[in-house]
Image (cartoon, rainbow, N blue to C red):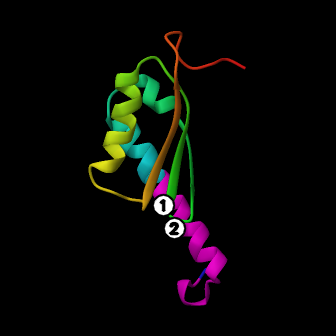
């Protein structure tokens, strides 16, 4: 599609996808398997992290890798800490 004719909603969607891809790339690059399991959402300049990690250290690492070079206006860290790791549903 010609980017000159994109609607505002299409531009937002494209931008959201770009931010989510970058968030996932950074979490994967942190070299901690548990960070690859994190769910993330992005809307209106806010990245929300959800899921479960095995330690408070990894909860902080997840946030720190996104804050080191900000890609969103705000990061909301809703990760839970459980020694058993990610929850199985």
Q: Name the residue under label 2.
A: 15
x and y, in percent, of residue 69 in the image = 28, 54
Magenta-span inclusion, residue 14: yes
Residue furthest out toward the right:
89
Query: What residue is shown at x 34% (from left), y 24% (from top)?
Result: 57
Hey, which residue is sitting farthest left in the picture?
Answer: 68
Per the image, is 58 magenta?
no
Quadrant including the C terminus: top right
Q: Dots 1 and 2: beta carbons under 8 Å?
A: yes
Residue 24 spot, x, y in % from top left: 45, 44
Task: Please say if 54 is above or below 5.
Answer: above
Give the residues drawn in magenta, as a range.
Answer: 2-20
Which x, y percent locates residue 34? Answer: 45, 24
Q: Tag 1, which secondary structure? A: helix
Q: How many marks?
A: 2
Q: In which quarter of the image is the N terminus?
A: bottom right
Q: Distance between the residues labelled 1 and 2?
A: 5 Å
Residue in the picture at 42% in, 52% down: 22
Q: Residue 18 carries which label?
A: 1
Mainly helix, strand or loop, the magenta region?
A: helix
65 or 76, nearer to the observer: 76
Side of 29 relative to 1 (left or right): left
Most foreground residue, 36 or 68: 68
Please name the residue shown 56% across and 68% down the image.
14
Pointer 2: residues within 10 angstroms few (<14), some, or many (20+)? some
In the image, 1: left or right of 59? right
Q: Residues within 10 Å of mark 1 (few under 14, many from 20)?
A: few
Q: Along the horizontal axis of the image, is 56 left or right of 39?
A: left
To which quarter of the image does residue 4 belong? bottom right
Q: Where is residue 11 in the image (x, y as percent from the top left)?
A: 57, 76
Q: Is residue 85 above or below residue 8?
A: above
Please tell me which residue is depicted at 48% across the width and 61% down the height of the picture. 18
């Amino acid at each position: 599609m010609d980017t000159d004719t994109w609607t505002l909603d299409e531009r937002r969607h494209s931008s959201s996808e770009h931010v989510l891809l970058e968030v996932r790339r950074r979490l994967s690059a942190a070299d901690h398997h548990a960070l690859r399991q994190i769910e993330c959402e992005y809307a209106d300049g806010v990245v929300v992290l959800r899921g479960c990690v095995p330690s408070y250290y990894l909860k902080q690492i997840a946030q720190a890798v996104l804050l080191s070079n900000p890609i969103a206006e705000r990061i909301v860290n809703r990760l839970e800490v459980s020694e058993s790791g990610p929850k199985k549903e």
